[in-house]
Amino acid sequence: MAERRRGKLKIFMGYAAGVGKTYKMLEEAHELKSAGVDVVVGYFEPHGRRETITKAEGLEIVPRKKIDYRGTVFEEMDTDAILARSPQVCAVDEFPHTNVPGSERAKRWEDVEILLAAGIDVLTTMNIQHLESLNDQVFHISGVRVRETIPDWVVEKADEVVMVDLTPRALLHRLQRGVVYEREKAERALQNFFRESTLVALRELALRQAAHEVGQRLENADQAAGGEGAFPVRKHHKILVLVTADPKTAMLIRRARRVSDFTDAECFAVAVQPGADLAQLPQPEREALERHLNFARNLHIETRILDSEDVAGALVDFARRNQVTQIYLSRPRAKTWFPALSKDPTQKIIELAKDMQIVIVSDREPRAQ
Amino acid sequence: MVSDFRRKTPEELLREAQAEERAARKGHLKLFLGYASGVGKSFRMLDEARRRRERGQDVVVGAVQPKAPPEVEGLLRKLEVVPLKMVDGGAAIDVEAILRRRPTVCLIDGLAYNNPPGLRNATRWQDVQDLLNAGIKVIASVNVQYIAELADQVEAITGKRAAETVPMSFIKSADEIEIVDAPPEEPMERSPEEQIEVQKREQRLGRLRELALVLAADVVDHQLNEYLEQHGIRQHFGAHERILVCITPRANLQAMLAEAKAAAESFHGELIVAYVKQPNISKADQSALEARLAIANAAGAHVEILEGDDPARALLEFARSRGVTQLFVGHSQRTGLARLCASPLDKLIWEGHGMDVRIFPQ
């Protein structure tokens, strides 16, 4: 059998609920349908919005799958039913959604991956705040720690990212008129994500991300066509992240991932342990380290555990041998009178690696209210 | 925390001037920004006009595009149109007729037109300014190709310069801006010979699209800063990457500037260069510093000169006021016993909350 063409993925990107992503996606489904394309809706979330519900009329909707979890019935997208139906195009709302436990796959984007692999084109929706590498920045802007995230490489693989824009003022009007949420929920929403300054900042992030996605695809297309790209080839960067049990490591990894994506750098993450063996560590520390290494791998960062008792020495040595251009570290935990004598690995590495670039990554805490 | 005595930056002064200008004019300006014809700007605008009318607002259309697709024609039939005024040598919006009609909202599809000679204003955007001053709310559309300040960038992409333009200050004075984004449409059938042309066209349109998205983000950033200032919030969100390169006598400035430029370009960000004036520095340091300032000037960088007894603190205060997200500094050069004590660099590392500190070899 001939190898199947992979389906194309188009993401409608917004910055808040109610900007019109689902509406836009369904509108495109209608356009495709009237052009004679076989299109179905795999999942859509009406949120009780009249305009959206009306927009779904006239489209074939694949019934959802019911999943029983601890006595409550949840509904999820029925990936197998869509595969059996085998349409040309499938519209799937809420790309970053986490499936209820007991589902075949943990994340909706993994279900979408199955559809794409089967040659089905997918239209989907997401908000900027769900992008993994922006998690700390979104926390800084909104005070909300978003739990449902999508690794950046999943978005990068999409064929198209389209910005669905609406001004915050228009969005707030819609919210006040009860178009987006029912009254009580709307009032709660106005307290956090829907504060005007938060909306404006999230919107700016979404616009910049969309510009980046467009630019990236043009570079890729140009290089594939044998061109040199619009920019001269830059000096090649290699970013190295120090992974420890410190909870700040996740933030470090996200920032390193984001910077390496934007600057076309390679990214590695290493931990340093005597015997390269995590088993000797106390359980909470071991678990934290493993979690951080896994997190890096999920973001497509290569990881390694170095065998040494000297964290700073081993890291700098590894960096020199591998032509690393920048070492990513978190801020030292405390001020000291004699930084040069400090045992803090960050202080020690700065002392040891005066011939290298070191990046101390900032904490991105929520702003004061 | 709040330092009221610091000098205002040009950007802050511009924002203040614009805020005053906006307060003086009574109307409200909303812009739809696109990057090519056919992305659906006209439809989006007229659809908004239709919804406003359904909500009972008094809406008229003051200008339409000469060639309208059928779905736009359909919307136009439901709206009141004040026709363009035909004058020798061209058409212009009929400002007098619109002012007599006094609608709440007036739609102007296509902002970048020069008026025929002999009219009250030379350009259409100035006509719109008159409508705004008269208290009419204006919704208008414009493509990124027609922004005067972007002409060089547009020419680099398309090889063409628009003859009719709108100044950036007018775009930034908008109360609201919305981008109409859509990927360029792919032609259905293509022969191998056409393939190359199609690819070139896609590259051109794609670059314009990227430019439009960045412009929208810049306008939004401008509005966000304005909002924060008005509400007395001295804090930045870091949605826009801003890189501050700090000049010191021993800094390897060429390398730092090259990397900072590349990073700013990758992030569509802003590059800022500064140094902190030191009272008692040695002759050698002074001449080293001057050599570096010359390098920065030769690279076309504007250098901000800061003052303060505590250099780290002066730098951090300035960085915060400008919403810096990445601070580029050199490694500490202390030797002997002095290196045991905390250096200005240590201070930057400990206290540089909200920004990454990137330390360069000297």
Image (tube, grey):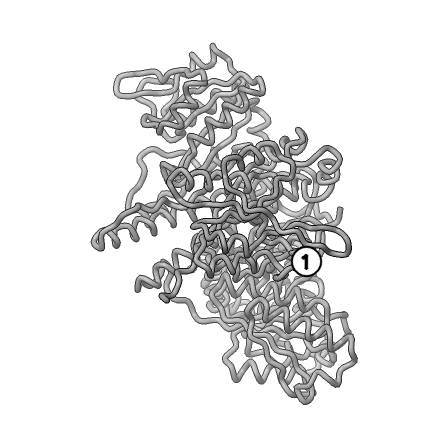
Q: Tell me the residue at 59%/58% (across/down).
A: A150
Q: Tell me the residue at 72%/76% (across/down).
A: A339
Would you identify the image quadrant in which residue A364 lies? bottom right
Report which residue position mark 1 lands on: A364
Residue A175, position in %: x, y?
Answer: 66, 34
Q: Chain of mark 1?
A: A
How many other residues sit within 10 Å of disc 1, few (<14), some (14-19) or many (≥20)? many
Is residue B313 in view?
no
Residue A80, position in %: x, y?
Answer: 55, 57
Report the number of numbered marks. Answer: 1
Nearer the observer, A152 or A25: A25
Would you identify the image quadrant in which residue B62 lies? top left
- In the displayed structure, does residue A243 sit left or right of residue B78? right
Nearer the observer, B232 or B268: B268
In the picture shown, does residue A350 fall above or below B218?
below
In the picture shown, does residue A361 fall above or below A163?
below
Q: Which residue, as the protein is rendered here, is positioned at the far top?
A: B100
In the picture shown, does residue A123 fall above or below A166?
below
Q: Amino acid at mark 1?
A: Arg
